[in-house]
Amino acid sequence: MENLQSEKNLQLDNQMDIGGHARFELNQGYMVGDQLIADFCPEITAVEENYAVDGSRSVLYEVTVTDKSGKKGEPRLVSDITRLDWFRDFGICDIYMGKRDKKILAYKLQQEALACKNRRKKFYISPGFHMVERMPVVAMGNRIISLSSMSGDITMISASKLEMKTGGISGLQMAKSCINFMPGVTVLLFYAALLGAIKPLLNFLG
C-alpha cells in the first residue's frame, strides 16, 4: 500500500498531459491532481514470458487491483493491458469512465510493465534434449531432468502427459545419482549417454 499511496510524477507525452501528480487516495481511488480517474487502482505486479514448444514467445501481465477501501483483489493474467474491460475482466463497474480515463490507466500499466522487476519465464518442453537458459535439460515423459537448479523465476513444464514413475526421486537427484555411479563422466557425456538410451522412447512419443 505504501507504494500506491506515495505520490508519483505522471510523465505523459504532450497529447496526454493532464498535469498534477498521480496517486492512490484511500476512500477515493486513483487520482491525478484533483481529478478522480477511477475509484480503484490497478498495478502491474508481475510480467510472465511463456515459450511454447515451437519456440514462439508470448507475454502475460499480472494485474492486481486495489479498491478504494484499500483491499487488494486476486491477481489476474492478461495478454493486452491496453484493451482491458474492467467489468468483464475484473468485475468492476466502469460505465462512468471516459475513454481518456481508460487511456490514462492503460498508460500507467504500460509504464509499470516496462519497469517491472518481477519477471517470470515459463518453458513448455517437448521430449528430448534441450538447452534452456544455457542449461542442459532432458524431458522424459512428464519429467524434466536437469543437473542444476534453475532460478526461482524460471519454470519448465513437459509437453508430454506420459507419467514417469521415479519413486519420489527428483530429476536432479536422479541425474546426480547416475553421474556418481559413473565417476569421471562429464555432464555432456552423461547427457549424450542418457539421450542415446532414451532416444527410441522419445521417437515413440513423437
Image (spheres, rainbow, N blue to C red):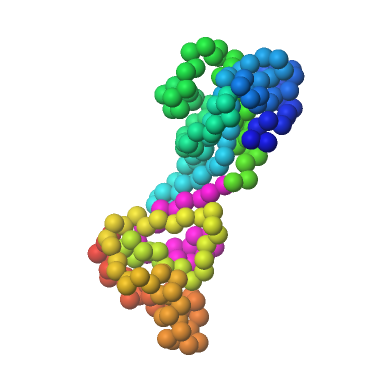
Give the camera-side residue of 199 and 15: 15
Q: Quadrant of the C terminus?
A: bottom left
Q: What x and y, as percent, mark residue 13? A: 71, 22
Q: Residue at horizontal 54%, vertical 57%?
A: 152
Find out whether residue 176 is within the magenta segment. no
Q: What x and y, as percent, mark residue 170? A: 41, 69
Q: How many marks?
A: 0
Q: What x and y, as percent, mark residue 48? A: 51, 44
Range drawn in magenta = 119-137
Q: Quadrant of the N terminus?
A: top right
Prevalent SS, magenta region: strand
Q: What x and y, as percent, mark residue 123? A: 45, 53
Q: Residue at horizontal 68%, vertical 36%?
A: 2
Q: Is residue 112 visible?
A: yes
Left or right: where 88 falls relative to 160: right
- Place residue 195 in its image quadrant: bottom left
28 is higher (above) or lower (below) than 49 = above
Q: Is residue 103 visible?
A: no
Left or right: where 41 falls relative to 122: right
Q: Residue at horizontal 31%, vertical 63%?
A: 141
Give the camera-side residue of 203 and 13: 13
Find out whether residue 133 is within the magenta segment. yes
Q: Residue at horizontal 62%, vertical 28%?
A: 108
Give the camera-side residue of 178 and 203: 178
184 is higher (above) or lower (below) than 85 = below
